[in-house]
Amino acid sequence: MFRHLASRRYFRSAARLMAALCITIVASLPASADIKDANRAALDKMIGDYIRANPEVVRDALLSLAEREAAERREQAMFILRSDDGDPFLGNPDASFVIYEFSDYNCGYCKRVFKPLQELIAADGDIKLVVKEFPILSESSLLAAQAGIAAQAQGVFEDFHIAMMIGRGAISMNSILAAAKSAGADLDRLQADMNSPAVEAIIARTRAAAQQLEISGTPGLVIGRQVIPGAIGLDQMREIIATERAANS
């Protein structure tokens, strides 16, 4: 099925490229060229002669279309990313500036970036940190991601997240439930919600956003319109935020 879809996307893209190329060539032909009355052979020769004489037109048309399609893909990715209903979050829920973090509880680098992110939202009251649960490292990563989303539904995500991030040792269902219990979660409800279609849909949405943004590892940060693969320090976060805020002011 995926090969079939990829083929369809390829042919649609190729068709758009050819259409744009033809439009560009025809629009650039001399005004005196009577295309309506020209037979196909004459038109083919005219286009061929024009391409040979002006190869940069072909290059520019293809580059322009590729850039436009890349921008469209990015807009689609950002739309999926910002569809964050049900995603866990930290910081100010009404903040004007939102950071998205693709995170896996088994990721050592995610735990490394945890402290700078905590310091950032503690010092800046106009930031909302949306945690995109992105379980990619193991089966226990998926269980922890499900529990994080379920904890958000009970309003205890922050304490759960902190317990998971500062915890040592391998993650297991026991350690997940211990973190949830310490956060004050209703464990029966939590376990029921973990396996719910709603939680499954949120994780699937995150996977789709990651694919569109070409994020394949954790942590992955989206700060404004900048996509940062990997952990960065607090000073760099602040610099990026300042740049993004200035660009939108």
Image: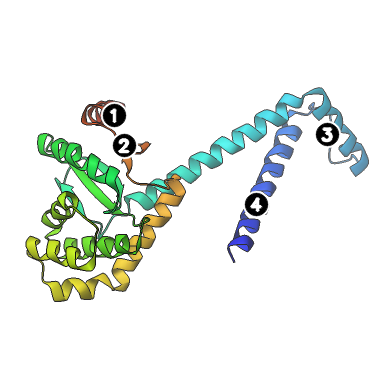
Q: What residue type is labelled 1?
A: Ile
Give the residue at x 28% y 73%.
195
Label of residue 10 in the image: 4
Quadrant location of the C terminus?
Answer: top left
Q: Which residue position holds label 1?
A: 240
Q: Is residue 31 above or below residue 186?
A: above
Label of residue 46 in the image: none
- Left or right, 70 with respect to 21, comes to left
Q: From this viewpoint, is residue 32 visible?
A: no
Select label 2 or label 3 by which is in front: 2
Q: Where is residue 65 in the image (x, y as percent from the top left)?
A: 61, 37
Q: Which residue position holds label 3?
A: 47
- Marks 4 and 3, Cα distance to the nearest angstrom? 25 Å
Q: Quadrant of residue 125?
A: top left
Residue 245 versus residue 136: which sits nearer the camera? Answer: 136
Q: Which residue position holds label 2?
A: 224
